Amino acid sequence: MNTQDYNEINIGIDTGQAVLDIYVRPSGEFQSFENNPEGIRAAIRFIRIFKPDRVLIEATGRLEMDFFCAAHKGGLPVCVCNPVQVRKFAQAIGRMAKTDKLDAQDIAYYGETIKPDPSDLKPEKLRLLSDLLTVRSQCLEMSTMQKNR
């Protein structure tokens, strides 16, 4: 490992409906913010202090989108990660426990190890179309479940 890698700052964010749990690697700082516009602004101010190389957040059913859009507009290098890959990474390093703080740590460690590129923010119309397709898919799935009953 070269010294440049060692000095990288990766920030992992575990997203919940109400809370963003943020872990800074390698300093080990942990902070929680509400997952609402005010909390997101406070989280971005907190993150900027560290001048991170990567800010990693899991794709969690669109709960991450408000933060992702705000952080992207704020110039932060945000990576939206596949939660299955992050979980398999955590299991591969021997982490079986699962809490919000541990998930945020695992996401940051995943970023340090895998080094994913920042995600692109799609144009707003494309995001809205994608949201509609997601809702349509969910409705079709629920309809099929009801028919099967």
Image: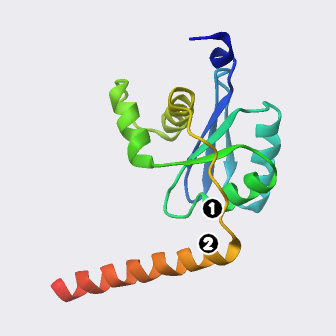
Report whether 127 appears left or right of 103.
right
Spot occupied by residue 60 in the image (x, y as percentages of width and height)? 50, 57
In the image, taking residue 99 as reference, residue 28 lies left or right, namely: right
* Rendered image: mark on residue 10: none
Q: Is residue 139 left or right of residue 54?
A: left
Residue 61 visible, this orientation: yes
Q: Quadrant of residue 9?
A: top right
The disc labelled 1 sits on which kind of residue? Met
Give the number of marks. 2
Which kind of residue does numbered mark 2 sit on?
Arg
Q: Nearer the viewer, mark 2 or mark 1?
A: 2
The residue drawn where x is 64% and y is 21% is 26
Residue at image mark 1: 65
Q: Residue at x 68, y 56 (%)?
A: 67
Q: Are marks 2 and 1 in contact (CB under 8 Å)?
A: yes
Percent x, y for residue 72?
74, 53
Question: What residue lies at 38% left-to-right and 83% top-to-bottom?
Answer: 139
Evaluate whether residue 149 shows in this view: no
Mark 2 or mark 1, earlier in chain: 1
Q: Please tell me how crowded label 2 is: few (under 14), some (14-19), or many (20+) other residues with Cα within 10 Å.
A: few
User: Crowding at label 1, few (<14), some or many (≥20) Cα neighbours within 10 Å?
Assistant: some
> Which residue does the numbered mark 2 point to in the structure image?
127
Query: Element type at marker 2?
Result: helix
Q: Nearer the viewer, residue 28 or 34?
A: 28
Q: Quadrant of the N terminus?
A: top right
Q: Quadrant of residue 46?
A: top right
Whole-percent x, y for residue 39 in the image: 75, 53
Residue at the (38%, 47%) spot, across then down: 84
In the rendered image, residue 52, in percent from the top left (x then y), is placed at 73, 33
